[in-house]
Image (cartoon, coloured by chain):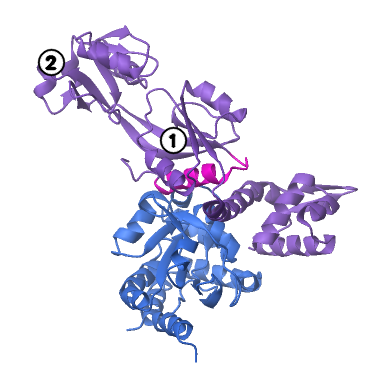
Chain colours: A purple, B blue
Amino acid sequence: MELTQVRYFVALSRSLNFTRAAEACNVTQPALTRAIQRLEDELGGPLLFRERSTTQLTELGRTMLPHLDAMLMAADSAAALADARRRQPIASLKIGLAPGIGCGAIAFAVREVAAILPDLMIRLDEAAAAMLIESMLTDMLDCALLPEDCDLPDRFNHWPLYDDRAVAVLPVSHALAERTSLTAGDLHGETLLHGERCGGFAALFDTMCQGQARLRRCDGAIGHLLDLVHAGLGVALLSERIVLPATLIGLPITEPALTRRVRLVAIAGRPQGAAVSGFVKLCRARCGVDGR
Amino acid sequence: MSLQDKLDAERNLRLVNETVRAAYEETVATLSRNGLMPGVLVEEAPFPDFILPNTEGRLVSLSALLARGPVIVQFFRGEWCPYCRLMLDALVTLLPEIEALGASLVALTPDTGLPARDAKINHGAAFEVLSDIDCGVGLAAGVVFRLPPLYKARLQTVGLDVPGRHGNDAWFLPIPATFLLDREGRVAWRFADVDFTRRAAPERIVAALRQLAAPD
């Protein structure tokens, strides 16, 4: 496949008009037609058909379009990032984080993009998954880290980043703090603090081991929750990736395994600037390397 | 035993299996007749500048490498491919000579995550292994093709999770082409073949590099 063939096909699939597509690509219509024919030869069938005065995508055309569009965007963004390294334009990176998902796993990618684009503006938003999806649809966010269990509209691409495991967070003075790991039985009779930013681990625990522990609703920022754990109000089940103060300890729970897969989510087919495409590529290149 | 001798032996061993033979012959025949080769970048063509992520989570810039000297850009299918494994080993052996001639080597695969990292770690590769996400740079170099049906079916039968490895379900692969770029980023020499069991001979890469360093 050639870059120009794919570029012409993607332009044509948008306008469904040979004349307009040729104009948009700055080529003659015969040249565009020849390029599309060569692409059809390579892909093994017609991508478009003409019906009376209209042009339509064939089934093969519809199947190939998102893949060819993604490949074209990848080609353009690899070059755009190289160009941005020379020109250093102002750029922004707006990342959504679902409740309880820290940015530790993606910080490396932000750092790399910022090294190329020194004027990069970074925004991290923590909110409920549904709100983050809405923000991406309205272009307020570029991409988001969401747990696997939330439903996504068809327009979204997603890639598994890592499996997040829960730890039981206790004060270092707690009777269990000497242990190296815990099971559900160890938490019998304990109070579990759970809130909207805890990543749903306490609710998962409660479903799997009903009655083992009491649940106490406790909404608020993670920092505030940690203060309450320190004061002895209860135990919190949080992502192992959350950095704890020295007064608290996080112990892995071996039975039952409390995990959730975290994925990177972005809208398919939306043109991205160099910063966003660089960030997404960095994250995709590390999919699963960090703790799967 | 030369790299091509090893590749030939591997191919002859595998083609005893009729299914493997049919998938191989279909791929070579499809790529021979469908006009892929004329689209592959030729000598003198400027290679598109790019920045891609490596297996350690860093961005690698072609122009930054070119500022230090000539660059060899090697496309490969992935560590799952036995011919790619042989080639990676040969490139690991060749690297000191490449570096002694002032050049660097980058190997681009559509694989991401652990499979891409394994290609580097399992072969002890000191060169950069870059994830060519969605085959973007491969497209710009003209080396990408869509897997023909028999070959795709064979990979699915043996349980190779190509969509998982690539992070898309397009089933595109690069032909394992080799490009030697001069310091201006132009293709000084290239090797490209529709037969994925044929690879650039290490001695030819070095000869091209020497020619570039000290033209006759």
The disc at residue A174 is 2
Farthest right residue?
A52
Q: Amino acid at mark 2?
A: His
Q: Which residues are magenta?
A: A268-286
Residue neighbourhood size for the residue with mark 2, other residues' Cα within 10 Å, grouped as few (<14), some (14–19), many (≥20): some
**Which residue is labeled 1 in the image?**
A263
**Considering only order in the chain, which callout, 2 or 1, is on the residue closer to the N terminus?**
2
Please give left or right for residue A15 compared with residue A270 in the image: right
Q: Nearer the viewer, residue B186 or A249?
A: B186
Q: Residue at x 43, y 58 (%)?
A: B130
The disc at residue B23 is none
Q: Residue at x 42, y 43 (%)?
A: A109
Q: Nearer the viewer, residue A185 or A27?
A: A27
Please give left or right for residue A165 compared with residue B135 in the image: left
Q: Residue at x 58, y 24 (%)?
A: A134
Residue neighbourhood size for the residue with mark 1, other residues' Cα within 10 Å, grouped as few (<14), some (14–19), many (≥20): many
Q: Amino acid at mark 1?
A: Arg
Task: Tell me which chain the residue with mark 1 is part of.
Answer: A
Q: Quadrant of the N terminus of chain B?
A: bottom left
Q: Quadrant of residue B3?
A: bottom left
Secondary structure of the magenta portion, mostly?
Answer: helix
